[in-house]
Image: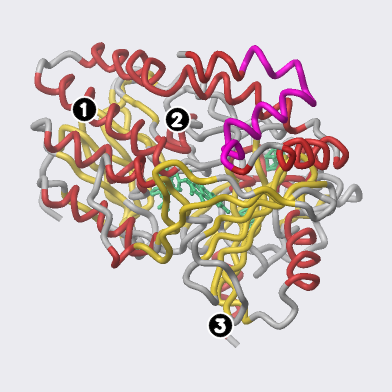
Amino acid sequence: MPQPHLMIHIVPGKCDYCGCCVGVCPEDAIELMESKIALIEDRCTNCRKCVWACPWEVIEFHREGVGHLPKHTPQMLNEAVKF
Amino acid sequence: MKNVDYDIIVVGAGPAGSTAARYAAAGGAKVLMLEKDRDVGYPVRCGEAVSHEGVAQFIKPDPKWIASSVSKFRLIAPNGSSVMPKLDGGGYVLERRIFDYELAKLAANEGVEVITKAYVYDLLREDGKIVGVKTLIKDQKVDIRSKIVIAADGVESRVGKWAGMDTTCHIRDMESCAQMTLSGIEVDPDVLDFYFGDEVSPGGYLWVFPKGNDTANVGLGLSVEEAKKKSAIKFLHEFVDRKFPKAAILTHIAGGVPCAKTNPEIVKENVILVGDAAHQVNPVSGGGIISGMIGGMIGGQVAAESILNGNVAHLREYDKRWHKRLGWRHDIFYNIRNAIGSFDDKTYNNICDSALKLPEDKRTLGGIFRAALWNQPSMILDVAKVFLQ
Ligand SMILES: Cc1cc2nc3c(=O)[nH]c(=O)nc-3n(C[C@H](O)[C@H](O)[C@H](O)COP(=O)(O)OP(=O)(O)OC[C@H]3O[C@@H](n4cnc5c(N)ncnc54)[C@H](O)[C@@H]3O)c2cc1C
Ligand code: SF4
Ligand code: SF4
């Protein structure tokens, strides 16, 4: 479950897996694999550095929180192919 | 996988990792190189420009990984005027997907084992000591032991952090980049183009690097501090729509370049950082292929020496040799980067005007630098240090 305070959202399907956001994250809160990216939610402090760094505008800041937004996780991919 | 321990594990098979692995193995160590992606050399996140002199110290230039040979720069000011100095010794626009592959083959020829689709997700510890890495190889968790770990995991490096080094790049120093490879356009295959000014990349630059006469890498980088206001992708789309509206887009990538001084710590216990992971990039140009290979070579050599004499404390020598070879220069280039970052369009136009007043044979990069100094006297001391040593 997302932390209630979380305001950072990685938009599903938009990422190029380039690592620019990882390079500026002071909390080591982004996990990046060949074609997977995920926020390590309990580490994120909502500092927004990744939002500013992303060349493709993949990461969004939502002041009201991100609980209601769809997540881009491997589980979600599995669900997507189930239908 | 064979059930063996290694002297050295290299994380990441970019130019820095392959070069570190190659020299470590040549120095007598048993080396394993792990790459998270399916392919070495792909995807390409790079403008692919290098100098002849830089690359030839590691590998004989070969047409199979050279897209264009170049002999000139063109520096284009915001008002459209330009100067075209010679590129001393010449240079190349590479095919990195083949070049990186060849570097990995050179490592393999020295006896390095390579595994792709091998993601390192943590360091392996025993009694508080680092004894190898934890990996996900083709979705299976595998722990692999080694005496030394060389982190060559690029701009997205996390291995150094896990070892206790702070490798976070300040947002002022990180260049947020976007690039397209465009085809069906007209370019001069002999010239590297650099565009400056607020319209294309405030504080940074936009490049058009030819790959033959109808194709080019067109990209730009700007400090994250600037990208806050407008992203790299927006700047790139605007330029391409204006300049190459009919082009076919063959590749489209995002990227980051850590244009900082060398990371304050690049050695900790039995872990060393090389390449982008160590912030071994030329902070003015953002070029990191050759400097990362130099870092990799020194790191690989020192790591092999440490294995042979059984003394991990010898790894400190890597930090010393790196700073003696290139680190000191990057410190100075970093100050120049900060001066250039504050140039406005007027300054660029003035520099170009002054350079154009120079006689043709004086329009070298040095001559243009002097013209730049005329506009920015505070740079004089820093530049003098670079050219006088
Ligand atoms: C848009 C752009 C344009 C550029 N243009 C130029 C240029 O024209 N000339 C120039 O000299 N330089 C240029 N650079 C810089 C250059 O690309 C880098 O400095 C260079 O690639 C650094 O080499 P490296 O080996 O340190 O890292 P990389 O080439 O990034 O290699 C790191 C490798 O580590 C792997 N890896 C990362 N994490 C893990 C993990 N946890 N487990 C396993 N593997 C992992 C990655 O998949 C990757 O293959 C450019 C960079 C960008 C972004
Ligand atoms: S908001 Fe800050 S802490 Fe959270 S992931 Fe982005 S950079 Fe890291
Ligand atoms: S910077 Fe953007 S495109 Fe690059 S890995 Fe992060 S989210 Fe993806």
Image location of residue B22, percent across then percent down: 20, 41
- State the residue at coordinates (17%, 13%): B311
Position of residue B303 relative to residue B30, above or below, is: above
Q: Is residue B363 left or right of residue A61?
A: left
- Dot 1: few (<14), some (14–19), or many (≥20) neighbours within 10 Å? many
- Checking the image for residue A81, the label placed there is 3
- Checking the image for residue B110, the label placed there is none
Image location of residue B178, percent across then percent down: 65, 58
Q: Which residues are magenta?
A: B361-382
Position of residue B98 relative to residue B18, above or below, is: below
Q: Amino acid at mark 2?
A: Gly
Q: Are marks 2 and 3 on the same chain?
A: no
Residue at the farthest right position: A64
Rendered image quadrant of residue B291: top left
- Checking the image for residue B160, the label placed there is 2
Q: Earlier in the sequence, mark 2 or mark 1?
A: 2
